Image (cartoon, helix red, strand yellow):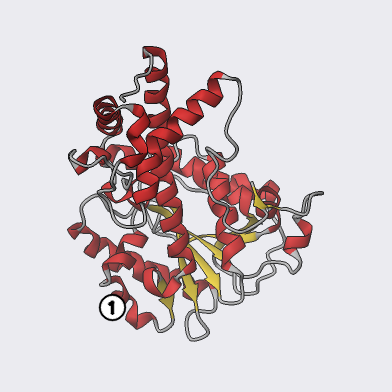
Amino acid sequence: MLVRIDDVTKALVAADLKRRWHFERETEFRAHLKHIWYRTDEFNIILGDVRHIRGQLEVKSKLKGVCNKFTGFYWMQSVECIILYASLFEEWRRCDPNFSIEFGHFIANPVKLTAAGPSTLREIVDAHASICAHASDMATTLEDYSIYPSYPSIIMVCDHVEGGIREKCKTADGDISLLRAVQHIPVLLVLTGAKNSLSISLESLSKFALPLNRDDAVGLDVIRVSLDVAVQFFVDIKAQTRNVEEIEHNHIDSSLCKLDVPKGYDSNARLDQDDWVRTMQTAAERDGYASIIEWPSTYGYFDGARGKLEMQSSLLRVHAERNGKELDGAWEHIRFAPRWIT
């Protein structure tokens, strides 16, 4: 028996599915970015012998990692990457009013400093210049990826994180607050001297300056601030670029579109929110809403169950909303680690 729903519910389901489309694309983005920061050998530049930089950039995933970023993030092996990245991501997500997930757009790419690589700030600045020179030349072959104007001009360096940071950031419930963590993670901001069309100065940050604690900063324009201050600084730099990523990219990153499409329909419908919603509702009208759970998956083995349940989940969310409730966890992304909160 075919089950129909009223027009008001259909409109609410359409709005819910649109939200779902964007939510799932961000879910894919978060998972991919987390993989990039945690699996440094596969995606990121490992700074040992600087003579091998070009060879690393010949790996397309590493070259793309440098593109569409506002700075390079250099971190020592001794620094814990997990809480560092989670704090950085959540603060950028919170502060950036025009948060973009297209084509790897993010505040920074991680560059791991090894014992055999640069050790002084001047050596790191020189290595960054080499990365930019090679990447600028090679990125011309990539569509939708480029070196942003600020990238050659400024870097972030994380040379240490105070011990016991997790304890300092615990809430009364025992959770670790990433919002607190960004206030306890110090980073160095270093101007490289590279010329560009932007006007970047560290003067406005002087009131937030922390002890430099470096004896190799002579001749460099450098300041140490907490990570939350640094993130806001780059949000302001992004504003200077006039949202360069939106100007350059007039289409979406299809690699983030992995929602399922009902059997018998064009799989490319997942690439556009309106097409996907229309396809989902057309299939529901055709088969009856009660039979939605029986839709076979047309995308992979692991997304099948999720795909079959998309419309039913939407109906449940809409029903809860119409009754003044919200399903627990319906719009919450998976945490970076258990008991880590924003």
> Residue at coordinates 59% horizontally, 70% vertically from top-left?
218
Number of marks: 1
Q: Amino acid at mark 1?
A: Gly
Q: Is residue 75 left or right of residue 242?
A: right
What is the quadrant of residue 185 in the picture?
A: bottom right
Q: Residue furthest right?
A: 172
103 or 292: nearer the viewer: 292
- Residue 268: where, in percent of width, then height? 20, 42
Q: Residue furthest top?
A: 7
- Residue 329: where, in percent of width, then height? 57, 40
> Residue at coordinates 54% horizontally, 19% vertically from top-left?
322
85 or 305: nearer the viewer: 305
| Residue at image mark 1 | 55
- Residue 255: where, in percent of width, then height? 29, 51
> Residue at coordinates 29% horizontally, 32% vertically from top-left?
280
What is the quadrant of residue 294 in the picture?
A: top left
Q: Is residue 81 left or right of residue 117?
A: right
307 or 275: nearer the viewer: 307
Q: Is residue 57 visible?
A: yes
Mark 1 packing: few (<14 Cα in 10 Å), some, or many (20+)?
few
Kind of element beneath mark 1: helix
Q: Quadrant of the N terminus?
A: top left
- Residue 171: where, in percent of width, then height? 78, 50
Q: Is residue 42 above or below residue 194?
A: below
Q: Is residue 338 above or below residue 53?
A: above
Q: Is residue 285 left or right of residue 266?
A: right
> Residue at coordinates 55% horizontally, 65% vertically from top-left?
157
What is the quadrant of residue 163 in the picture?
A: bottom right
20 or 245: nearer the viewer: 20
Q: Is residue 244 visible?
A: no
